[in-house]
Image (tube, coloured by chain):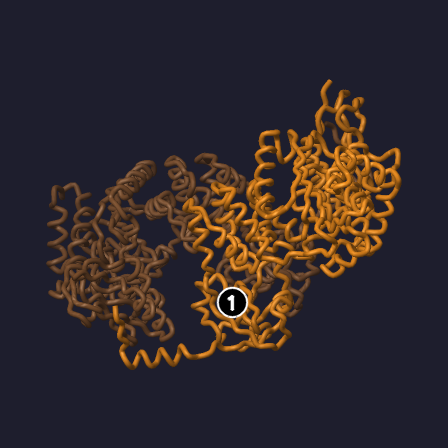
Chain colours: A orange, B brown
Amino acid sequence: MVTKTDKAAGARSADRLGEQPVPLRAKPLAFDTFRENVVLLPRNSPAVRPERLAGLRKVEIRAGGVSLLAVPMICDDPRVVGRDEAGLPQPAFRRLGIRPGDPVIVTPAQPPRTLDAVRAKIAGERLSDQTYVEIARDLANHRWSDMEIAAFLVACASFTTPEETLGLTKGMIAAGRTLSWDHGAMVVDKHCIGGIPGNRTSLIVTPIVAAHGLIMPKTSSRAITSPAGTADTMEVFAKVDLDETQMRAVVERCGACVVWGGRVNLSPADDVLISVERPLSIDTPEQMVASILSKKVAAGSSHLVLDLPVGPTAKLRDRRAAVRLKKLFEYIADGVGLALEVVITSAVEPIGRGIGPVLEARDVTAVLEGRASAPQDLKEKAIYLAGRVLENDPYLHGGAGERRARELLESGAARAKMAEICEAQGPSPIQAKIGNLTHEVLAERAGRVSAIDCLRIATIARLAGAPTDPGAGIELLHKTGASVTKGEPLYRMYGSEPSDFAFAMEAAGEDAGVRLEP
Amino acid sequence: MVTKTDKAAGARSADRLGEQPVPLRAKPLAFDTFRENVVLLPRNSPAVRPERLAGLRKVEIRAGGVSLLAVPMICDDPRVVGRDEAGLPQPAFRRLGIRPGDPVIVTPAQPPRTLDAVRAKIAGERLSDQTYVEIARDLANHRWSDMEIAAFLVACASFTTPEETLGLTKGMIAAGRTLSWDHGAMVVDKHCIGGIPGNRTSLIVTPIVAAHGLIMPKTSSRAITSPAGTADTMEVFAKVDLDETQMRAVVERCGACVVWGGRVNLSPADDVLISVERPLSIDTPEQMVASILSKKVAAGSSHLVLDLPVGPTAKLRDRRAAVRLKKLFEYIADGVGLALEVVITSAVEPIGRGIGPVLEARDVTAVLEGRASAPQDLKEKAIYLAGRVLENDPYLHGGAGERRARELLESGAARAKMAEICEAQGPSPIQAKIGNLTHEVLAERAGRVSAIDCLRIATIARLAGAPTDPGAGIELLHKTGASVTKGEPLYRMYGSEPSDFAFAMEAAGEDAGVRLEP
């Protein structure tokens, strides 16, 4: 086809197309929108007509070479935004690298090309490695809306091949920064897929491994659905909110660290996916594997020991499911060049006694200090896992790793290393004391504790306030196998916020999560 | 289990639980958020702590017996919201039925119970009729977020039984109001699933049917992805934004109307689903059937003629797909007590000549006025469909419906009825004149027009500005079968916004959508 333009109209449209978009002055808004970027524009903004805005989900805001997407809102109050202004919350100023009054260009955002991949995935198609690279980049740049992410995740949940999971993992690694360490080839790590309350082995494994001399720059997460994440419990001992420079300094000095991964911003695409998976309770093996392994590779790990707990109330209910997941982890790890050892462990109850940051930290301290009162299950699991990690050392094998781990723990070397790490990370900013509200859950009859429900105990501890309130949680007074008399306390709940605590007590009254058999 | 509360803590928590939530004063915000409700709270609000808000997606705002959900944002500017205030945009005031300064209660929103159904659907479960009733009610009350809706829709796209589609349809009907008409048992309607540009038969069928004496209270939609909806084209002739009382008055007087359905608020749950389906391009048979039939039943229709166009660039590409969809429509119609006739029509090109509100209205006028220049395909299709509707009249059958329709059209009775309906609905508020920018797309060689791509033509007409600019669009100068010489214009584009028009010209230059064969 040849197209021919009516002369007058053509000339006019060419003139208009040559126009530059109108720059607006960036005005700081004292707003905290928690999640999505927002931009406030006046109704008569010279940059975008409001009737155009009504049909848009997002606008693009550019300053220098940087751009971000924001949800547009019209504001008719000239005190908040004037005619030539664009009102932006503080985080947007930081991300754009601008100061108040600087010029920004606001234009309707073109929908990202990768949204075609969402539609293709809904239609049951396989996506290429290159597509996953682009998807992860657009996710990391916040170019997808929550509903687009949700549609993608649900479509993936019904059909994703292992090759695609590898593509997604590689894409997520490529979409963020990768740390590298100048300590030779081996950088070890240890991870657990979670679901077992009180399972705070990392805080014991890391100092053992570092005391031996291996490099273990551990980035850990805060709790998402559990009563405490490793970062939450570590925060009872030390500051965990370190940036990369601070983290490097700690590892330089101690050979290890235990910091919160959020500040280091590894695999940012994964964080975006998680922000939608969490409220929707989407928890597929594929997303879990891509999430964990992308974070580990981005953190610069070369050798990983991964703990998959299996039990009646764990994330993995039976060995078959665990073996399937193990194979997927191994396939992806191989594809991204990570030396992985998966260990399948048995989990019939929470580990240790405390559940919640402060209570778990107390257990960790007892193990590191070698106290007689220390929970033996936590100690033995930590020694076992530390042993697996240490056997990456070519001089330790055939059980020597576990023997070495026990020696480093029992000699006090791990305790000293932990003190060194905590000192290097700096003092914690939080007030870490056990909650002043207490409540005991009593056995309603005599019997033997036959099971403790990990999910139920986690729910009650969260209702009591953990981890937002680090001193809230549960202290288990009897574990499986113990005999109790009628009216004897099974566990003690702690909290400090009365209304939350009342909910937790109510929940414990409905189902305490401890099974008794005669 | 027996739970026992530590006395001091128990007493304290009971006191706190007895507390009433703190009422805030509603402060009007001069904000237009387009979609979601937003509430602005100061950081030190006595109603909700900010650390609590950070983890919440929504808060519930109550006033009297009415409540709505809103996305919370923190505002640190006391000029915008003071300590005891909750800043709300105007639509929230209307929906809550409050005035500035009235007390409102703001509390963290409990996630709706129906979100469990989203998770169940993701897991591949079937949902019960009762669950669909609850889902539709929560959708209509805006209790689901966009991402939850997206997850639900994608999960449904991979697996929904006909029984579930019936459950969803019934649920959506129950979640809104149902109009009833005092005109005996028969209320007729006509609908097309869309996808064929220029297919504006409703504006001819309705006056024919009403001229015969059947009741046809037509609610129609504005364009979603097309260059014009029936409501957009009707708006060239008359006001379409009528509320229920005004609509009833028109039907009382004329026996029919053609109004925009959005104001009458039928099947509000459907509107919410569509607001997410549209940007994600989710277009499943199940959602389409539930959407159309819930709207028709809610509008009080008893008899419906439904047009399913099949063609290479139509929504339905082959007869088999059309027959499958026909069966699903019939199954659901039967389940909701609607007498349905499905007609499968052939669609190889747009209907009529004009595409875009004003240009389509011009075709409709030509047909109603019996002009020699009127597009015959539009005229004949309207007569056929009107005939099918008229055969619901027990005195008309075996082709008598179509003869009667032709007679009412050619006698001018339909034209007079249309004038009566337009007068009753009132004058249109829009400026309806054809765009002043024009551009002709020329044949690049001589040949015969073998096909016109409905999708491509719709895209170009939308880029030119239709339907936002009612005078924008396309006028087809040759239809399939016509022979053209090299350089002869194939169609003329109209618009009035130069930058939009330039995009449209560029798109037509890449692929004009008209196929020529030698």
Residue B244: x %, y % from top left: 36, 55
The total number of labels drawn is: 1
B412 to A456, vertically: above or below? below
Q: Is residue B231 visible?
A: no
Considering depth in this image, is A176 or A230 the residue closer to the camera?
A: A176
Which of A238 and B179 lies nearest the eye of the viewer?
Answer: A238
Is disc 1 placed on a helix, strand or loop? Answer: strand
The N terminus of chain A lies in quadrant: bottom left
Query: Is residue B370 among what the camera can see?
Result: yes
The residue shown at (55%, 59%) is A142
Quarter of the image containing the C terminus of chain A?
top right
Establish if B195 lies above or below A333: below
Q: Is A209 positioned to the left or the right of B141 in the image? A: right
Give x and y (percent) for residue A477: 80, 31
Q: Which residue is depicted at the point 30% across and 56% down?
A: B249
Closest to the observer: A327 or B185? A327
Q: Which residue is mark 1?
A: A60
| B246 or B229: nearer the viewer | B229
Please state which amino acid type lies under the numbered disc 1. Glu
Q: Is residue B261 left or right of residue B57?
A: left
Q: Report which quarter residue B211 is drawn in.
A: bottom left
Say which chain tag 1 marks: A
Image location of residue A487, percent across then percent down: 79, 25
Q: Position of residue A490 (x, y in %)?
A: 78, 29
